[in-house]
Structure formats: C-alpha cells, structure tokens
Amino acid sequence: MEPVQEIELLLLPEKAFDEAAVLSAIHQKLGKKALDIKGFNIRKRSIDARGGKVKFNLRVVLFFNQVAPAEVPFELIHKNVQHAPEVFIAGAGPAGYFAAFRLIEKGFRPVIIERGKTVRERRRDLANLTKNHIVNPESNYCFGEGGAGTYSDGKLYTRSDKRGDIQRALGIFRFFGADEDIQINARPHIGTNKLPGIIEKMREFILSCGGEIRFNTKLTDLKTGFGKLTDICLNGNEWIPASNLILATGHSAEDVYYMLHHRNIRIEAKPFALGVRAEHPQELINRIQYKADFQNEYLPPAYYSLVAQVGGKGVYSFCMCPGGIIAPCSTEPGLVVTNGWSPSKRNNPFANSGIVTEIGYEELATLGDVEKDPFIALKFRRKVEEASCINGQNDQTAPAQRLTDFVKGKKSADLPVCSYTPGTEPYDLKEVLPGFVFDRLQKAFVEFDKKMKGYLTAEALAVSTESRTSSAIRIPRDKVSLHHPEVMGLFPCAEGAGYAGGIISAAIDGEKCADAACINT
C-alpha cells in the first residue's frame, strides 16, 4: 500500500469543517483500507453548488502506517542587508514588497520608493474621497503602501499557477498574519479590514533587515547611457545613481508611462477590459446560487463567475465581491472610477462585481494607429472615465441604472440603495459608455439571467465605470533577462507593466524581477 494517497470527498456544509465527520466520510469511502490511516490533511476546499444540494468538495491527503506530518508554515529568514548592494524598487504594492523579500533572501538591500503614504495614513485620504469627493492624486485606492489591492479586498484567487509558486506566496501572507485557510480555500481572501495590519508587518520586516522604504517619494525621471540605466530622479529634484530599478508602479501611474515615452523608452498600447460594476442584494445572489440552502449558516455569502459571448466578443464578471462595497477609485479629479471590496466576514448586504468586455486591438484600431500611438488605449479609457464624471470636476457621484432599465435602454426613474458612498444618480449609461461596450453588456445581462435566473432584476444596479481591470499600456521586457529590451537594469514588473492581474500574480512577478535584478547587480 502506498504510504500517501489523495482522495476527494463531497460533504454537506455542516460536516466539511468537522474533523470527525471528515474522518467518517473517509472510512465510508475506503472501507477496510481506512483502518490503516494514521492521519490526514485537507489540501483544498471548494463549494459545489450544482444540483439540488450545496456541498463542499474536499481534496484530502491520507497517510497510511505513518502519522500525518505536522505542518511547517513558511518562514522568511531574517538577514541583515543594511550594507549589501542596493536594488531600487518603485512601488510598495505586492510586487514591490515581494521583490524586497526576495532580495533580502539573496543578500541584497531593497530601497523602495513609494509615491503614496503608509497604509494607515492612506485612510484619511480615502475617507475624504468617500465623504467629501476630494481626490488626492498621490494617496487613494490605487496609490500608497500595499497598492491597489489593500483597500479593494485582498482577494488572493489566481489562475497563474504556471507563473510561479502560488503556495509560497500564500505562505508569505500567512507568515505575516493571514489566516491558514488561505492555503486551503479555493478562493482565498483576506479582507480589507485585515490586510492593512499584514502590510504593516511586511514593512516592519523589510526595515528590520536593513531595507529602506521612502514614502511620499515619486519616481519622476530616469537616465540611461549606452543602453543601461544610470540614474533615477525622485520628486523632480533628487538624482540618485542607480543601475537596477524594478518598476512596479501599478496600472494607474499614467505619469510613469509618459515619462518613459519622453525618454524614448518603448512602451506599447495593450488591450484591457471596461464596463460597469453590477450590484445586487447579497441575499438574492445566495438564493440564486444556493437555492433551498441559501440560509444555511455554514455557507459563506455566495459568489458567481459569469461569461457570455456577444458577437464573438467576451463579456465576463471580474473581481466579484460577496458581501461587499463599491468604492470610488479615481486617481485624480474629473474622473469617476469604481472598484469593489469586501471585509473578511463578507457580511455587508450587497454583492458586486465588475462586468466588463475586452477593448482589443480591433477596437483600438478604429481610433487610430496602434503601432504609432502607445497611449491610444489609455486615452480611450480616460475618455470614458471623464464621461462618467457627470456632476463636474470635484464630484464623485457615479451614473447608475437599474439593470432592467439598462437592458431596455431607458433612464431609471429612481435607484435602489447602493453601497457606493459618494452616491449614485439615475443616468442613461449609453451616454457614458462607448456604443459597442453598452451593446455587449446589454446583451450579456440577458444571457447571464439565463445562467442565473433572477440575476436580471430591478433590484440590481449597473454603476459606471469599471475601467481599471488591468493596464492599458505594456512596458516590454526580454522573456529571459526581464530587462526592458532597450535598457539593461530596468525591470518592468507586474500589473503596471502588463505582466500580472492581481495580488498573487503581482507578488510572483515581483519575485521574478528580483531574481533578475540580483543577476544584474
């Protein structure tokens, strides 16, 4: 008999977290063979809502004739790198911090430049944005310690298993205080209420190892010579010699793209996705997904994942937030941008999700020469965000429409209560969204209702605009060395460069770029 075996179990929600019930299910499945089991570990837990009864699917590792080994949590080793060779990192998001961890592991000193504030100091600016509609261009939902994911949920779900070691990345989050379930649950999630404390511990670790983090410090320029990075400029007046820079500035740092273009460093237009944020009562989503079990106390608030083809083009849900809140995510006055987040308990009364469609090269080509204008997608995005700012430069009220009215193409007479605190206003969204985007979403909502009966309801809202799903610019890099092809020592990284799409994939890419920078140092 093999000493280790992996099996799958389908259990009712009330039994999936009960060790005795799991062991009983193992015995039922294996019969006499189960007598030799000395222990088991749950490797993965996911919800199976198919059929009439909701169950949990458990992937369980069994140990025969040997005791199940005690779990050894991942641990970052503390090293003193205060006097080690330096590598600069622009951006203190997941890519930047994970790059720093990797550099410390390898004996290098990370110097992180962050345009925004510390994770706690950001809160005042977020409150000012939410309550008073005042946007701080350097401190908001996108800019500041922890990056865009810190105050927009902390979802750790990713499909990027081919990009790197997901379990290592999750293990690092656990090392800094995340719950152990993030390495078991199929859709791991930390929560906006818990993630700031974890980010602070990450910062303390980097500093305790001799690393440096400079907040309120903006990368404003750089110099090259003979195809190599030579210097970087901070805050417009401080030039520092630098031979390595991991550029992890996020998908909203438009000024960085223009700075690179000004320096004749190649950037490229990139397809991205755009649409609206749809919000439903969470109880309605529970009822649709869980059916008769929708009030089962052992089940978490239900999520959904939807996709439809409209005229050969995809429309899909993005960043779905059960028990969540729609947040104002503009990075400057005169734009309205939305995103969603959930607390760790996901106990708010609403569920929201981005519903978006790809703005591909085919669509961009109708606007101009994609090859000659690397900003064509960025300008397209900005135009929609400006159109969504319906009440003037200093107002973050979002245009919205009941989902049923959106499909009918008529302005809503009134709107249901919405979690978007700056407020919503009835508006015909076909006046805000590009015609082909509105048309695709309109048809997709009808298709979504066929897959989730009851999804298309007057209780639900479409709120504009959801536009920061990914970068509208790609900064090219060599596939092997990860250098920019024209500038040795410049490492385009993660979401802002077009190589990641969430916290975990950004973290993994940060580590890869750190490895590359070590080779170059």
Image: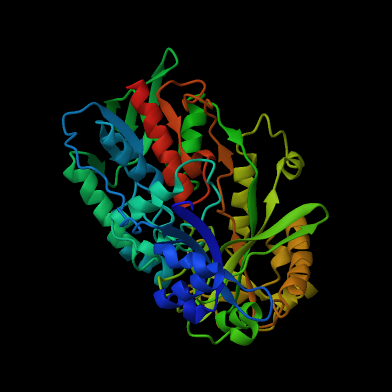
Q: Is residue 429 left or right of residue 507?
A: right
Seen as rendered, the residue at the extreme right is 311
Instruction: Return the x and y of residue 215 as percentages of the image width and height.
Output: 27, 46
Q: Is residue 310 left or right of residue 247?
A: right
User: Which color scheme is applied?
Assistant: rainbow
Please tell me whether residue 125 is drawn above or below residue 403 in the rendered image.
Answer: above
Instruction: Return the x and y of residue 485 as percentages of the image width and height.
Output: 52, 22
**Could you tell me which residue is drawn at 73 percent across and 65 percent down?**
430
**Could you tell me which residue is drawn at 57 percent across and 53 percent down?**
469
Is residue 216 visible to the viewer in this orientation of the structure? yes
Count the marks: how many? Answer: 0
Please tell me whether residue 16 is drawn above or below residue 182 in the rendered image.
Answer: below
Please tell me whether residue 23 is drawn above or below residue 360 in the rendered image.
Answer: below
Q: Is residue 258 left or right of residue 203?
A: right
Is residue 396 visible to the viewer in this orientation of the structure? no
Instruction: Return the x and y of residue 9 as percentages of the image width and height.
Output: 55, 68
Please tell me whether residue 312 is drawn above or below residue 439 in the rendered image.
Answer: above
